[in-house]
Image (cartoon, rainbow, N blue to C red):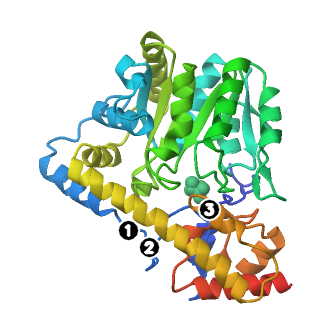
Amino acid sequence: MWKEIEAAPADAILGLTEAFKKDANPNKVNLGVGVYKDDQGNTPILKCIKTAEQKLVETETSKGYLPISGSPAYGANVQKLLFGADSEVIASGRAATIHSPGGTGALRVGADLLKAFRPDATLWVSTPTWANHKGIFTAAGFGIKDYPYYNAQTKDVDFEGMLAGLESVPAGDIVLLHVCCHNPTGVDLSAEQWDKVVAVAAAKGWMPFLDFAYQGFGDSIEEDRTAVEKLAAAGIDFLVASSFSKNFGLYCERTGALTIVSPTAAEAAVAMSHVKKTIRVNYSNPPAHGGLSASAVLDDSALYDQWIGEVAEMRERIKTMRAALVDGLAARGVEQDFSFIKEQRGMFSFSGLSDDAVTWLKENKSIYIVKGGRINVAGLTSANIDYVCDAIAEALKG
Ligand code: LMR
């Protein structure tokens, strides 16, 4: 069957890791995939998760199926992270949450669900956006359009352009928005800007679909959810795809959630009935371990405090490496001003490196960066920062 069929290209992000693994250069550095590394270059299991897992292994008595929507305790904990424990959304029961296999799974389940009821809708994404967004929604059958987001001159959000773009989105279409730590640019909206976006969504009648993969990597768990709170307060329909790959370090456990927020509890119950149908014909019901581990952390105040500390440690180390990169390039006499990298938020830096420079760094220095110039700052360490700065300085000299 496959004899006449051309091989598919490698994935823009995960394909880099495949190439990196095969690279024999002892100095190689993977700044591609968004996976956190500590200063020793390891992706640690968080201490709070390790403790929770031990408890889980000791106390679990069955490997029976979870409900289609996942563990109810996990769903309740996800809602507390999204809206705050005392929120009106939780009290009124107008959100439905399911455990999805990772943030990608949440986006795909949400896309399939929306496609069933909005077959003619278009999905709008920011320019640029995460390399997998268009693929996920195209696979679900959506046509895709872009709205302006990043201004390469100011290295900031082109907010006027964005707002004008969103004003033109027809009612019933779906708009994908990054809640914080925008991937790939690292530039986010202010609270006032979110107010305006929420007002446009409410006035125009398009459906916000929030991608929330980096809660805690911007400022804090609470501050990073501003957009979610504002949309909830507007009382309109929206969806949130959460990922706990980064903030709980649960990458391989595929721990995510899809939350469907509606104006009333009755509508949320209808949404839940349909999302269960969507899941049942896809993967039937979710894996348990990651969700139960995260839930065990969130249910225990000591483990919760430890988690907050561990998230802060990751966030602060990334900021330190941002500064080290900017200062390292300046110290090597690089004329281009990279100081904007210090202001970017989350794991990534949209470095402004050209695709030619990205290719040169891979081929000559075994430094792997995503096309478009996105650097995973969390992959920089005290051991590789000088090598990376030397290499970028050399690449920029041409
Ligand atoms: C990334 O953007 O690198 C991460 O979200 C991992 C992925 O699946 O692409």
Three-letter code, disc 3: Phe
Q: Is residue 345 left or right of residue 244?
A: right
Residue 125 visible in this rendered orientation of the protein: yes
Q: CA distance from mark 2 to mark 3?
A: 15 Å
Whether residue 172 is situated above or below residue 25 in the rendered picture: above
* Pointer 3 local density, CA inside 10 Å: few below 14, some 14–19, many at least 20: many
Q: Quadrant of ligand 1?
A: bottom right
Q: Name the image quarter holding residue 343.
A: bottom right
Chain-order first, disc 1 or disc 3: 1
Q: Is mark 3 within 8 Å of ligand 1?
A: yes
Q: Is residue 187 left or right of residue 34?
A: right
Chain-order first, disc 2 or disc 1: 2
The local secondary structure at tag 2 comes to: loop
Q: Nearer the viewer, residue 74 or 160?
A: 160
Q: Is residue 145 left or right of residue 117?
A: right
Q: Name the image quarter holding residue 199.
A: top right
Marking on residue 348: 3
Q: Position of residue 151 (x, y in %)?
A: 81, 53
Three-letter code, disc 2: Asp
The local secondary structure at tag 3 comes to: strand
Whether residue 385 is situated above or below residue 147 in the rendered picture: below
The local secondary structure at tag 1 comes to: loop
Q: Position of residue 267 (x, y in %)?
A: 48, 12
Q: Nearer the viewer, residue 213 or 306?
A: 306
Q: Name the image quarter holding residue 142.
A: top right
Marking on residue 38: 2
Residue 102 visible in this rendered orientation of the protein: no
Question: CB of mark 2 within 8 Å of CB of mark 1?
Answer: yes
Chain-order first, disc 2 or disc 3: 2
Q: Which residue in the protein does label 1 denote?
A: 44
Task: Give the mark toward the camera: 1 or 3.
Answer: 3
Residue visible at 23% across and 48% down?
301
